[in-house]
């Protein structure tokens, strides 16, 4: 006869065993910052050798393009990828915070606390899944089990007050001690591989950024950018192999945050606003690039290929009219390269910059700068930027997915970036209440 205490223990253990049996396959999401999909879908045309990335086209499900968010820059886009909503809902409006008086230069939206809706990694944790991340934007202080957060996107940014590491000794525990001159993506790849092998997360987020840096400095599809992508292809292979060695059922996703344009000119609209009396400057000190802003009625919040125009007093009708007149005159000048000017209501309808009076989008070849004095037009030949409206085809980002239970050779055409998080949530068996877009069709 079965011992009663053993029977009770077995009954109590059954839900845990059942939950374990139904645990979803691990998911590794690798973001290749700034990768236009045609780097892979038209690799031959650009002379690119990316064998690992090309396997996603034959072995997996992929999109010809992903229409992103306003603005098409890194931090709002990555937050949409893990929440499924527009910036107006998740609260990350650009990379850098609006700082009209220059009181906090170089401060980005690093901290997780700025996100206003539930994220994919929070939903995964609630479901009892282990989470990991390496250099994923807006994750300083995030509730991620194994986290090396992005905390200084480039050497030009300041650093946050909160530690980017969880647990605090994670680098020592992983035995990662990069040299000062080490390639940052090489270090990130080593960190990701070590977390996958040691901690075996069910959800892993990795952000690799060197392609974006090369495109900014040398333009998209330049020899430098192409070489960076070919190196990334090797790093993707390393991460993929580490994940599959832990669990052959792992699904691997490749995403990117935005596309890219080549630019040759930078336009400083704030210099125009200063000349129009909308910005008042102090005296420039020795060694400073620009004079300090003493007061402002309107100022541009730059975002690469576009900029939001904010008013100090949103109810100031006279200033609104004056700003509109300045912008209309600027748009009529072909040297300033303005493609279109969106009103507040048009911006709101597309989910970006909720407090902006206008959004200025530039033409291909022109980007926005933040100088408040000096020349309005600055030459910047053979460089690159993004941040244009997401409806611009060159701003489309990438989505590729392969692994057990993923359809092979399926072209999704063009998808909405807000569909990515619900798709990942479905794979992990979790829900994101704020996300309303349907998942993509990835099942066989």
Image (spheres, grey):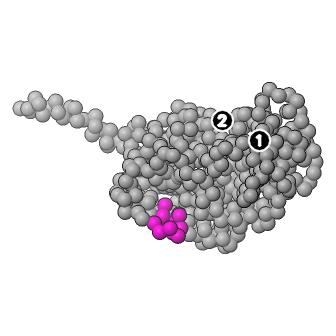
Image mark for residue 89: none
Describe residue 264's horizontal placement relative to residue 222 as left or right. Answer: right
Residue 164 position in % (x across, y down): 47, 50
Q: Is residue 27 visible?
A: no
The magenta stretch spans residue 78? no
Label for residue 294? 1
Q: Is 141 situated left or right of 369 in this image?
A: left
Of all residues, the one furthest to the left in this rendering is 1
Asked whether residue 156 is in view, the answer is yes
Disc 2 from disc 1: Cα separation:
29 Å
Q: Residues within 10 Å of mark 1 (few under 14, many from 20)?
A: few
Q: For numbered disc 1, what is the local secondary structure?
A: strand
Q: Residue at x 78, y 35 (%)?
A: 311
Q: Residue at x 79, y 63 (%)?
A: 380
In this view, 109 is above or below 290:
above
146 or 83: nearer the viewer: 146
Residue located at (42% from left, 65% from top):
177
């Amino acid at each position: 006869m079965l011992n009663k205490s053993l029977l009770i223990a077995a009954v109590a253990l059954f839900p845990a065993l059942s939950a374990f049996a139904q645990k979803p396959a691990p998911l590794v999401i690798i973001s290749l910052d700034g990768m236009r999909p045609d780097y892979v879908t038209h690799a031959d045309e650009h002379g690119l050798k990316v064998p690992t990335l090309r396997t996603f086209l034959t072995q997996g499900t992929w999109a010809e393009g992903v229409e992103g968010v306003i603005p098409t820059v890194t931090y709002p886009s990555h937050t949409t990828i893990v929440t499924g909503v527009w910036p107006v809902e998740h609260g990350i409006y650009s990379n850098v915070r609006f700082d009209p008086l220059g009181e906090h230069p170089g401060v980005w939206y690093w901290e997780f606390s700025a996100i206003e809706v539930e994220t994919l990694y929070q939903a995964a944790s609630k479901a009892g899944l282990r989470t990991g991340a390496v250099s994923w934007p807006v994750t300083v202080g995030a509730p991620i089990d194994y986290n090396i957060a992005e905390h200084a996107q480039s050497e030009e940014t300041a650093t946050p007050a909160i530690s980017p590491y969880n647990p605090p000794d994670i680098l020592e525990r992983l035995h990662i001690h990069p040299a000062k001159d080490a390639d940052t993506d090489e270090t990130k790849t080593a960190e990701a591989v070590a977390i996958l092998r040691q901690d075996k997360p069910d959800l892993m987020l990795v952000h690799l950024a060197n392609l974006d840096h090369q495109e900014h400095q040398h333009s998209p599809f330049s020899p430098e950018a192409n070489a960076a992508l070919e190196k990334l292809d090797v790093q993707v292979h390393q991460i993929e192999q580490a994940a599959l060695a832990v669990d052959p059922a792992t699904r691997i996703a490749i995403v990117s945050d935005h596309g890219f344009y080549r630019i040759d000119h930078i336009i400083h609209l704030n210099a125009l606003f200063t000349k129009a009396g909308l910005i008042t400057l102090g005296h420039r000190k020795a060694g400073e690039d620009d004079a300090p802003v003493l007061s402002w009625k309107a100022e541009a919040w730059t975002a690469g290929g576009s900029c939001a125009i904010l008013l100090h007093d949103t109810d100031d009708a006279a200033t609104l009219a004056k700003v509109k007149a300045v912008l209309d005159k600027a748009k009529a000048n072909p040297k300033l390269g303005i493609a279109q000017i969106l009103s507040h209501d048009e911006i709101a309808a597309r989910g970006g910059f909720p407090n902006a009076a206008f959004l200025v989008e530039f033409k291909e070849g022109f980007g926005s700068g933040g100088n408040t004095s000096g020349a309005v037009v600055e030459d910047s030949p053979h460089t690159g930027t993004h941040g244009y409206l997401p409806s611009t085809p060159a701003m489309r980002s990438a989505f590729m997915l392969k692994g057990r239970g993923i359809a092979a050779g399926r072209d999704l055409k063009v998808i909405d970036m807000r569909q990515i998080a619900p798709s990942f949530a479905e794979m992990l068996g979790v829900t994101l209440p704020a996300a309303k877009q349907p998942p993509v069709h990835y099942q066989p």
